[in-house]
Amino acid sequence: MEKVIDLRSDTVTQPTPEMRTAMSLAEVGDDVYGEDPTVNRLQQLAAEKMGKEAGLLVTSGTMGNLIATLVHCQRGDEAIMGDKSHTFLFEVGGISALGGVFPHTLPNQPDGTLELDDIRDAVRAKDVHHPTSRLLILENTHNRCGGVVLTAEYTRQAGELAHEMGMKFHLDGARIFNAAVATGCTPAELAAPADSVTFCLSKGLCAPVGSVLCGSAEFIEKARRLRKMLGGGMRQAGVLAAAGIIAIEDIAPKLEADHRRAARLAEGIRQIPGLYLPFGQPASNMVFVGLDSETGLTAAELAARLKQEGLRVGVVAPDRFRLVFHYWISDEDVDRVLDGFRRVLTAA
């Protein structure tokens, strides 16, 4: 049976054989008591990679971002973030529903940034009529801006501004290891200005479950309590943490191959009539593909036809796809994806 090539997201990754072996052999304990040695090792490793004092294993990036917001903010405070940010678009309004935190959105620029002047102007004056501007949230890499990468210099400037204005700064670093590859910086350099940072183990890093939230020891102590409140206190979680350790130590150094294959696919897409790159050449492992109206197809219709070819792509707009590269996509798969697009569009 021919392999199904799934480019809908890097969340579809399966754990590697090495991860499965490590999971089966993991030394475990009760993590709610802080007694799971494998979880403790993962949290320490994650904190070191992010340049922070401590880390906390959570079930997902959404939970990590929520907990960070709840630690930094009180009910009635506001968090400033981009209008294309993951926290605003794809986290079910959790900061408002569960934390009473008001999202104050600013326009994301094409490079994923927020204008520094916009951030400064958005901070509320001290007035009984206003919520308190308490938190700035940025995202790196930035999903809905095309997988673009925030530089260490921009992040430093934004962090300094947030602190100058009396706010905390949280970095949604779901794919920060991809950002590190793209910039040539370490994750710690990219996260240095942030008071807290999350990153995902279960996207391009191939682990089956989990994210890690990192910050100061005091911050993580508060975050641990909130994790328990939200139902995220896990017991013998070392079976998951074992895969996370391999994700950081073995898979993260290989992410450059995903970027290289994404770039090669993009070059091929440029040569196919009816397709274009709305965000230009990909900055990381995501390729966004636009569909010309002259093809007579919607993105959903084309995706359905590609599925018959054994190719799965993510539809993100009526005329747009997202293709995300990960560990299980090979050079040969890139050729097959390009051939599939050509066949389907020719048949149309």
Image (cartoon, rainbow, N blue to C red):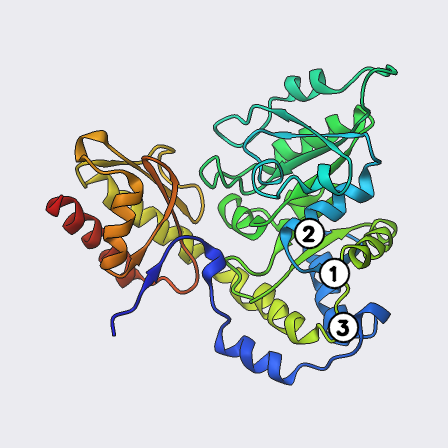
Residue that lies at the very extreme toward the front in this rendered image: 97
Height in image: 195 above or below 292?
below
| Sequence-wise first label, 2 or 1 | 2
- Secondary structure at badge 3 equals loop
- Secondary structure at badge 2 equals helix
The percent coordinates of residue 122 (x first, y second) are 70, 19
The answer to whether marks 2 and 1 mark residues whose Cβ atoms lie closer than 8 Å is: yes
The answer to whether marks 3 and 1 mark residues whose Cβ atoms lie closer than 8 Å is: no
Height in image: 268 above or below 150?
below
Q: Is residue 30 left or right of residue 189?
A: right
Neighbour tally class for label 1: few under 14, some 14-19, many 20 plus, Cα within 10 Å: some
| Sequence-wise first label, 3 or 2 | 2
The answer to whether marks 3 and 2 mark residues whose Cβ atoms lie closer than 8 Å is: no
Q: State how many labels appear.
A: 3
Q: Which residue is mark 1?
A: 232
Q: Which residue is mark 2?
A: 63
Three-letter amino acid code at disc 1? Gly
The percent coordinates of residue 161 (x first, y second) are 73, 26
Three-letter amino acid code at disc 3? Arg
Q: Residue at x 60, y 39 (%)?
A: 139
Three-letter amino acid code at disc 2? Met
Give the quadrant of the N terminus. Answer: bottom left
State how far apart marks 3 and 1 are (Cα).
10 Å
Q: Which residue is mark 3?
A: 235
Q: Is residue 193 left or right of residue 228?
A: left
Q: Residue at x 73, y 76 (%)?
A: 236
Q: Which image quadrant is residue 154 in? A: top right
Q: Residue at x 63, y 50 (%)?
A: 187
Q: Residue at x 24, y 39 (%)?
A: 270
Q: Is residue 302 left or right of residue 101?
A: left
